[in-house]
């Protein structure tokens, strides 16, 4: 397995020596927790390792070569025997790249558990969803997933993964800090003031991430066959903790299930509006993130939802459409545009056009008139279930009168909406007569 992150404890010979060293131990990583943002290229890694120390002064060498670790954010603390273990700040030896040195003063010999934390980039996650409509399409099974991708240059074995929705204040890009030839742009001795400023910058961001990790637990029922992702509300942040551990090698992605909600109530709606959608009918799917719809435990991160329909035959699925959506808070409605369809058709036809009620000015010129248009609208439902169709008609003028054999709703001064619910495999018809007033005829309306 590729290993790029190296820890060594070496004995010092009259100060810092990088020639002959006495290798004491190569401690492996006992545990690691990754807190990964989706709004910035930023991850907080917290590792626990058991160092083998000798009484007196020990030197701990840390290399971040071939990784995207920000060296200014490195920090180590003793997790036990803190009264007998003193850890100095990390120093950066001159003329040595990708290497830091901790001095550990120990008043004991043996194992010393420590936690090493740092910021890194190259780890990311995104959410995506699969919706499966029931045969009658009144309900949907909604499955949520997250895909974690590791391009950090470091393998993380058996890592506990936390995923955060929310923005963090970034002063520098972590990847840029990690790729510097030297920690502070130039070789040689590092100015103490610049070293302290950079160290504090990393600690401020890490402290913000630690505060995020202190949220309160909401919880969600787990699938028997899938790992649970716990959701925690954290003010402007939202934290997803994946139960158990995952091994995520560098260069790989891993898909993890977030939730699985059955019988989510949904509303299907077909819309026709020539000015907006052209000649095709567009399908919409809506639901609410609340308990009544078997959701509502937590907000839902934005992502792409692909919708399928259960055909009822041998558990086959039929693709229906897809739509991207933004973050959905609890108790909020969402309406998704699944795109145009061919199995519901609306065809408006102009059957007659005439003008009437001419008015003239004092010179005998036409100053006002009416335009009268008769439309027939055909609605075909070739599906096996009833559908609800909204037909919006827009007018070029706010001066109009409409008469129809079908009920309609006035939306605003220039548009109306007809609603039909044709039964399966039928064709419906309705007509309307639109009279629009022009010129001085408008003054009498």
Image: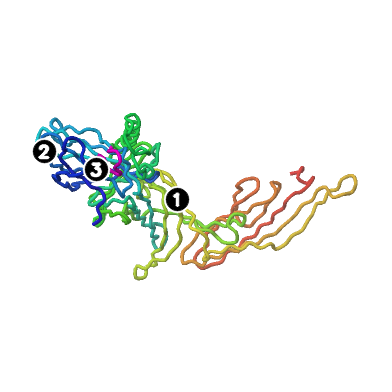
* The N terminus lies in quadrant: bottom left
**Position in image of residue 342 (x %, y %):** 53, 65
**Image disc number at residue 243:** none
> Residue at the left extreme?
109
Mark 2 surroundings: few (<14), some (14-19) or many (≥20) residues within 10 A: some
Q: Indicate which disc, 1 or 2, sits on the residue closer to the N terminus.
A: 2
Residue 103 sits in quarter: top left
Question: Is residue 297 something that shows in the picture?
Answer: no
Above or below residue 117? Residue 268 is below
The kind of secondary structure the magenta stretch mainly shows is loop
Residue beneath the point at 65% across and 60% down: 431
**Image disc number at residue 54:** 2
Q: CA distance from mark 2 to mark 3?
A: 18 Å
Residue 278 lies left or right of residue 113; in this view the side is right
Question: Is residue 430 something that shows in the picture?
Answer: yes
Above or below residue 196? Residue 346 is below
Q: Which residue is mark 3?
A: 62
Determine the secondary structure under disc 3: strand
Q: Indicate which disc, 2 or 3, sits on the residue closer to the N terminus.
A: 2
**Position in image of residue 192 (x %, y %):** 32, 30
Front residue of 214 and 132? 214
> Residue at the top extreme?
193
Q: CA distance from mark 1 to mark 3?
A: 43 Å
Does the magenta segment cover residue 184? Answer: no
For the residues bearing labels 1 and 2, Cβ distance under 8 angstroms: no
Residue 24 lies left or right of residue 357; in this view the side is left
Q: Which residues are magenta?
A: 92-100
Mark 3 surroundings: few (<14), some (14-19) or many (≥20) residues within 10 A: many
Residue beneath the point at 49% across and 55% down: 337
**Position in image of residue 165 (x %, y %):** 37, 43
């Amino acid at each position: 397995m590729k290993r790029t992150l190296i820890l060594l404890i070496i004995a010092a010979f009259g100060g810092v020596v990088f020639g002959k060293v006495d290798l004491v131990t190569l401690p492996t990583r006992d545990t690691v927790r990754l807190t990964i943002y989706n709004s910035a290229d930023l991850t907080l890694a917290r590792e626990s390792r058991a160092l083998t120390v000798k009484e007196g002064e020990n030197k701990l060498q840390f290399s971040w070569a071939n990784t995207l670790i920000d060296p200014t954010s490195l920090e180590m603390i003793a997790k036990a025997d803190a009264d007998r273990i003193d850890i100095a700040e990390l120093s950066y030896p001159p003329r040595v790249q990708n290497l830091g040195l901790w001095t550990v003063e120990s008043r004991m010999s043996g194992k010393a558990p420590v936690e090493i934390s740092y910021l890194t980039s190259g780890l990311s996650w995104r959410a995506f969803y699969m919706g499966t409509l029931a045969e009658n399409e009144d309900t949907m099974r909604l499955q949520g997933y997250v895909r974690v991708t590791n391009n950090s240059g470091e393998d993380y074995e058996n890592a506990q993964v936390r995923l955060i929705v929310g923005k963090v204040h970034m002063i520098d890009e972590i990847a840029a800090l990690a790729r510097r030839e030297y920690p502070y742009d130039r070789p040689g001795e590092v100015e103490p003031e610049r070293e302290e400023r950079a160290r504090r910058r990393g600690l401020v961001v890490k402290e913000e991430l630690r505060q995020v990790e202190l949220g309160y637990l909401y919880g969600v029922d787990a699938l028997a066959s899938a790992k649970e992702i716990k959701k925690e509300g954290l003010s402007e942040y939202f934290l997803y903790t994946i139960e158990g551990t995952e091994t995520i090698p560098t260069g790989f992605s891993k898909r993890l299930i977030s939730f699985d909600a059955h019988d989510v109530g949904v509303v299907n709606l077909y819309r026709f509006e020539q000015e907006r959608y052209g000649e095709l009918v567009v399908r919409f799917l809506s639901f609410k993130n609340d308990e009544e719809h078997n959701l509502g435990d937590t907000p839902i991160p934005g992502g792409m939802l692909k919708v399928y329909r259960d055909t009822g035959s041998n558990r086959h699925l039929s693709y229906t459409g897809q739509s991207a959506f933004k973050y959905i808070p609890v108790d909020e409605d969402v309406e998704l545009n699944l795109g145009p369809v061919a199995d519901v058709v609306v065809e408006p036809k102009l059957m007659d056009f005439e003008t009437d009620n001419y008015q003239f000015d004092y010179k005998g010129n036409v100053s006002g008139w009416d335009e009268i248009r008769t439309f027939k609208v055909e609605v075909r439902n070739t599906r096996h279930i009833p559908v609800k169709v909204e037909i919006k008609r827009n007018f070029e003028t706010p001066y109009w009168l409409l008469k129809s054999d079908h009920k309609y709703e006035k939306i605003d001064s220039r548009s109306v909406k007809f609603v039909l619910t044709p039964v399966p495999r039928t064709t419906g018809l309705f007509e309307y007569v639109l009279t629009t007033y022009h010129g001085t005829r408008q003054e009498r309306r």
